[in-house]
Image: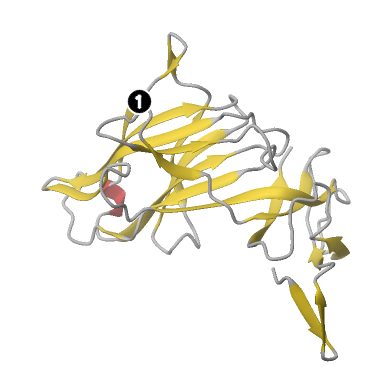
Amino acid sequence: MPTEVTVGGITSPLKATNLSVYLDWDNVGANSQFRVYAGLADTLWDVDGTDPGVGDSSWVLQVPTSGPYVEFIRQFLTTPVIDLTGATAPVNLSFLFKSVSEPEFDYNKVDISTDNFVSYHTVFSHSGGLTTGGVNTWTDTTIDLSAYVGETVQLRFSQNGDFGFVEPDNIFALDSIDVSDAGGSIFFDDGGDTPSSMVPSGFVPGNELLATLGPGPQPTPNWLSVSNMDVLFGSDDNVEPGDDIRIGVVFVSD
């Protein structure tokens, strides 16, 4: 977002930014919701050496105990393009992960895409904690990707919070990410022991601009206008001029 705007040759500090949308949706469930958020384009991923899965460090995402992180958090760690056009089955993704999350509400995922995530398929999902004697436990996971032989793919690891409350100190950690075929490793990331080509990104939804239950069942198009949603001074007042932000549009199914 800019810090200043110029109108009629006069430059002034940015004081308001309004968002307007048209929406048409079929609200079948009584509690299904349509939500719009504005939030920081902020990543919480970091390389940390406190408790690596192997080696000296690992990728770690930890939800802060304060700040605009209490709902609908989305955090991504994405591989570069991985070339499977010459791969020989079986092709497997293996990785170590550690997770602490609210069961059935906050969850970790791995998605795969052949078109830069215009579309994708979820190949792994986990919700809840992984502990042994109260201590966070590293777990080894292997996923068959043989169906993607002949393609170029990307993998995206993500932390996903529900729209109600994301518990502080939730953790998703990754190490020793390996894509291999019958001939050996095709892609490998060691959690920061050596320079990484993984790309961290995220969305921290500080401002809930809209939350509506909608009009009920709509078998025919019925476009509604929602205007003048204040991006700067929405419900949480966490977006400021000069921030890099994202707009999140969410359908919450009952």
Whether residue 1 is situated above or below residue 130 in the rendered picture: below
Q: Decide if residue 189 is on the left or right side of residue 224.
A: left
Whether residue 13 is situated above or below residue 70 in the rendered picture: below
Q: Position of residue 165 (x, y in %)?
A: 70, 33
Q: Position of residue 223 (x, y in %)?
A: 84, 65
Return the residue at label 1. Answer: 139
Q: Decide if residue 198 is on the left or right side of residue 38.
A: left
Circle 1 residues within 10 Å: few <14, some 14–19, many ≥20 = some
Is any atom of residue 72 visible in this view?
Answer: yes
Near-viewer residue (9 or 105):
9
Give the residue drawn at x 78%, y 78%: 5
Whether residue 134 is situated above or below residue 208 in the rendered picture: above
Number of disc labels = 1
Is any atom of residue 143 visible in this view?
Answer: no
Quadrant of the image for the N terminus?
bottom right
Q: Decide if residue 25 is on the left or right side of residue 116.
A: right
Q: Which residue type does callout 1 highlight? A: Thr
- Assign a secondary structure to mark 1: strand
Q: Position of residue 152 (x, y in %)?
A: 31, 61
Give the residue drawn at x 28%, y 52%: 195
Query: How is the rendered protein coloured?
Result: secondary structure
Q: Quadrant of residue 113?
A: bottom left
Give the residue drawn at x 44%, y 63%: 116
Q: Residue at the top extreme?
A: 133
Give the residue drawn at x 73%, y 64%: 241
Q: Decide if residue 243 is on the left or right side of residue 120.
A: right
Quadrant of the image for the C terminus?
top right
Q: Residue at the left extreme?
A: 183
Q: Position of residue 42 (x, y in %)?
A: 58, 52
